[in-house]
Image (tube, grey):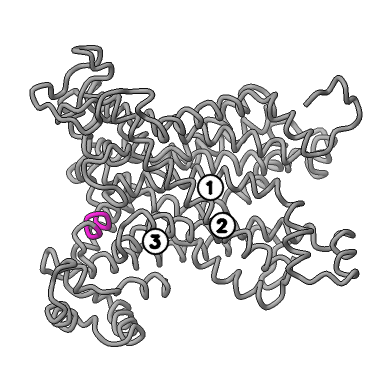
Amino acid sequence: MFVVASVLPGSVGRAILGPFALQESVDQINKELGVNGSLYSQYFRWISHAIRGDFGDSYKFQGPVTDYLASAFWSSTKLAVLTLIIVVPIGILGGAIAALRKDQASDRIITVTGLSLAVTPEFAIGIVLILFFAVKLRWVPAGGSADGSIIDQFKVLILPAVTLSATLFGYIARMTRAGTIEALASDYTRTAELKGLSRSRVLGVHVLRNALLPTIAVLASQMSYLLGGLLVTETMFNYKGLGLLIANAANDRDIPMLMAAVFVVGTFAMIMTLIADVITAWLNPRIRFGSHV
Amino acid sequence: MNSETKPIAKTPSQEMRSQLLKSKTFLLGNLGVAFWAICAIAPGLIVNRDPAEQNLIKKWTHPFTDGFVLGTDRSGRDVLSRAIYGAREIMFIAPAATILGVVVGVMLGLVMGYLGRVVDDILSRIIEALISLPVILVALLALTVLDAGRATIIGVIGFLFAPLIARTVRAAVLAERNLDYVRCAELSGENSLYVMFVEILPNIFGPIIVEFTVRLGYAVFTMAGLSFIGFGTQPGSPDWGRTIFDERTSLLSNVWWPSIIPAIALASLVVSINLIADAIQGVVDK
């Protein structure tokens, strides 16, 4: 975050006024915006305000950044939560099926499809979904903001959520598959089978519980992909969340807005990584903090 | 390779090569990438219409009419030509960025894995911090502040991929560094650079090739996303990401071809790269 924030202030005045402006005007606007002085003092001033929730005023909207940020954050949270509700169960199921049919046709199909979807940009998937479900079938709107009744909100959210899910499915399925294969080959699974436990009990209690460990870890690391995906997906569906806010702020050179939004997303990504580490350590007694393998 | 005259055991790399050539996904993937590479180098061989030529009277011509095989867009430009020419920018930037990332990442990974201790600890912490942020977001920030030319995009994507590659290379080096051949080279008095680059590097070539193909897919993904948001390509460029952004509203008038065609082109490229990566990974892992 420090690296990112320190890259940012660059020449804000130059960015606003364009390459042909006089150096004096550039200096003046830099002074007005408080982006003169050393990088370190700028950074310190910015971060000390940011911690108190004061990100300054947006250049474009001429109002406090925080107001726009809060509603965008809430919109993005709704989208992210619906995405996870869709993709986590399907991804785990897909991965488990692939593992149980390892090296058979259905395994290959799930693995290759999942990986292909994961590298296909969100907008390429999104545009096909819009064509079929919004334009041809007219089931849901092609985009817009989620407000009104729960059903209306769901209709707006479902296409972007499915788009993001398609990208994330491959990772979750792959990790579950790897975890399940490892668990299936383990001694405790053999012991459980030899004890005469039913197949479903062996799978449910012994295999899946251990297989989900790496999945949880990957899920949290994928949060950064999900957050990155919001940028493109929200732009595609014109959904007013953090992603669209960042894309617009970058295009408008609205630096305070951009920095604030990135600060929020960056902090969120780091917290998720931390939570993932804690959960992994808690679930798995073999992993201890500070121990080098 | 002529297996009939040489029935003796193949070297591991020959073995890998012959396994790869038997893999259908590998061949299919190469076919796709080769096609787009030809489109990028010599688009004139495949289509003869100028992708920038406007003709407003022929706006939104349906596919297969008036000699426009895939129709025209909102400015009456030929969709097929634009899809073919659209490969140019991305087929240059993505490989260049990936090569940069691999070169930097391999050097970092070798140093971290081989020298270990303090160097490794410091670099590992920096890498963890960089990795936890979404790549496209950091790239967007850098492009907002820096001049958004080609060199910047290549540099930014390459720089952001380097830590991810370094992590993989480091793990591969750790597996090699205590093997006999490394010890042997050390005992015969070779310096660290020689051991890293001449002894270890050739032996971790497999994971590096896998990493290269996987990252190439992500470079296309990232570049397309940036272009879609409006960074990295000029307005009016036939680049797929930008075209989809410009033409996405045509969909609402039931005009699908100007946006769906470049989406298919983009998907076919990333899936092809991915098929190659998957096939190589399968062979290297064995």
Q: Is residue A110 above or below residue B222?
A: above
Q: Is there any visible trace of residue A152 in the rendered image?
A: no
Residue type, numbered disc 1: Arg
Q: Is residue B140 above or below residue B188?
A: above
Q: Residues within 10 Å of mark 1 (few under 14, many from 20)?
A: many
Callout 1 and callout 2 share a chain = yes
Magenta segment boundaries in residue numbering = A245-250
From the top left corner, tell me how far across and down residue A208 is, in percent: 65, 42
Query: Chain for mark 3?
Result: B
To which residue does mark 1 refer?
B215
Asked if residue A265 lies left or right of residue B248, the reply is right
Q: Chain of mark 1?
A: B
Q: Quadrant of residue A252?
A: bottom left
Residue under the point 57% across and 54% down: B102
Tag 2 and tag 3 share a subunit: yes
The residue wearing badge 2 is B164
For badge 3, the amino acid type reads: Val
Question: What amino acid type should be assigned to the residue bearing mark 2?
Answer: Leu
